[in-house]
Image (spheres, rainbow, N blue to C red):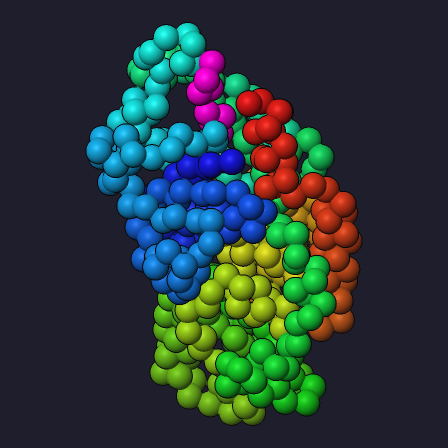
């Protein structure tokens, strides 16, 4: 089938990250996909070759072209439209496809299946809202129907993005080889932690703890906002307490921008993963390693409830809940130990147990394809 997927990049790569993973997964299953995006620059490193047209089955198009009548008249009609996170398809694009001909023509070219792909949450409203219809009451598509499509963590939702070859990729993965390719040599007894974050309020406290820990730690810090914040916090620590890492128990590597596959590899290579947003949370779940999630903050503090629902879903131990509250600024910063090695194993068990259950569910792409074929 031909798919049109629409994405507006707001910030922090999550929207384009999710939409691209969906495009890539569909193309791997033989589907043809057009991705309409208003800022495709991150795909240069997120999906090398995508902007050059070398990614089989996926065509990346500038959002502005979705209003170009000449181009639109030359395109084959897509069977499915997907709005990423309610980005709203351009009226010109809708009008180009809206039926204004005879009933016979309409029978030959049915209306597209139109989905609004929503944000991920473990909250109860997701099950109630998944699949609900939204009739279009005005404009060129009047009389059509849009469906709300919710990813989620239960059988009553749309599931999670997961490529069909993910288990095989993980089985073939060699952490030492991947680290070596990044110029990183893992020392004996060294604990590897990945850091993909916004600006967690207790980062400096964590850095000081790791610098005095008897277990050596190597932080692998992702580029962009994460790297800038870690460098800034280290600069402040050096100014206030130059000897804070005198024991050299803490090592830090700053990584270049990683493709989505290499970001997966980073999570697989580490013993504990600090992740942020939506896409990286799902990838950390599939990695099956202990994780700490920094949720995207909202002005009305609605993210507090969303975070609690996720921690309930994975049956998180009390110590992991406490760290999440501090890492996300929900509880005030306290002195003392943030990471206790003996507790990290229990964190990992909660993630693995959740992953095993989620692996039994159909993935998001499979479910969307089934929904589209059923409703054509």
> Residue 233, can we see it?
no
Q: Is residue 167 visible?
A: yes
Q: Position of residue 138 (x, y in %)?
A: 34, 12
120 above or below 24?
above
Q: Is residue 162 left or right of residue 184?
A: right
Would residue 85 appear left or right of 67 to someone viewing this image?
right
Instruction: Residue 176: give x, y in percent of width and height.
Output: 64, 82
Up-down: is 111 above or below 313? Answer: above
- Residues in magenta, as a range: 107-115
Instruction: Where is residue 353? Give x, y as percent.
Output: 77, 53
Q: Is residue 336 above or below residue 73?
A: below
Task: Identify the residue at image location x=49%, y=26%.
Answer: 113
Q: Residue at point 66% right, 52% down?
A: 164
Left/right placement of residue 331 relative to residue 271 reads left
User: From what the image shows, is residue 6 above or below residue 183?
Assistant: above
Which residue sits at x=44%, y=60%? Answer: 47
């Amino acid at each position: 089938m031909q798919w049109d997927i629409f994405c507006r990049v707001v910030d922090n790569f999550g929207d384009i990250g999710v939409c691209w993973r969906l495009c890539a997964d569909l193309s791997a299953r033989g589907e043809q996909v057009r991705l309409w995006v208003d800022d495709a620059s991150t795909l240069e490193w997120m999906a090398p070759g995508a902007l050059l047209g070398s990614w089989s089955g996926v065509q990346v198009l500038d959002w502005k072209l979705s209003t170009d009548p000449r181009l639109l008249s030359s395109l084959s009609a897509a069977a499915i439209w997907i709005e990423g996170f309610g980005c709203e398809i351009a009226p010109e694009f809708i009008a180009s496809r809206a039926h204004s001909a005879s009933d016979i023509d309409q029978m030959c070219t049915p209306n597209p299946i139109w989905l609004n792909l929503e944000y991920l949450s473990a909250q109860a409203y997701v099950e109630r809202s998944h699949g609900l219809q939204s009739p279009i009451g005005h404009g060129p598509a009047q009389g059509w129907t849009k469906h709300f499509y919710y990813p989620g963590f239960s059988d009553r939702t749309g599931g999670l993005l997961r490529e069909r070859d993910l288990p095989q990729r993980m089985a073939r993965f060699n952490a030492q080889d991947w680290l070596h390719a990044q110029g990183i040599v893992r020392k004996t007894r060294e604990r590897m932690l990945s850091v993909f974050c916004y600006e967690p309020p207790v980062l400096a406290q964590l850095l000081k703890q790791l610098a005095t820990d008897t277990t050596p730690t190597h932080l692998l810090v992702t580029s962009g906002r994460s790297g800038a914040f870690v460098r800034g916090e280290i600069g402040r620590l050096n100014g206030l307490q130059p000897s804070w890492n005198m024991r050299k128990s803490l090592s830090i590597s700053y990584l270049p921008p990683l493709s989505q596959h290499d970001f997966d590899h980073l999570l697989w290579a580490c013993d504990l993963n600090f992740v942020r947003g939506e896409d990286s949370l799902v990838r950390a779940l599939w990695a099956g390693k202990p994780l700490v999630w920094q949720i995207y903050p909202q002005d009305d503090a609605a993210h507090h409830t969303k975070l609690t629902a996720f921690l309930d879903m994975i049956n998180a131990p009390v110590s992991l809940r406490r760290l999440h509250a501090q890492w996300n600024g929900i509880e005030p910063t306290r002195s003392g130990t943030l990471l206790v090695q003996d507790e990290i194993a229990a964190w990992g068990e909660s993630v693995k147990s959740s992953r095993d259950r989620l692996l039994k569910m159909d993935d998001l792409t499979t479910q969307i394809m089934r929904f589209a074929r059923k409703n054509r």
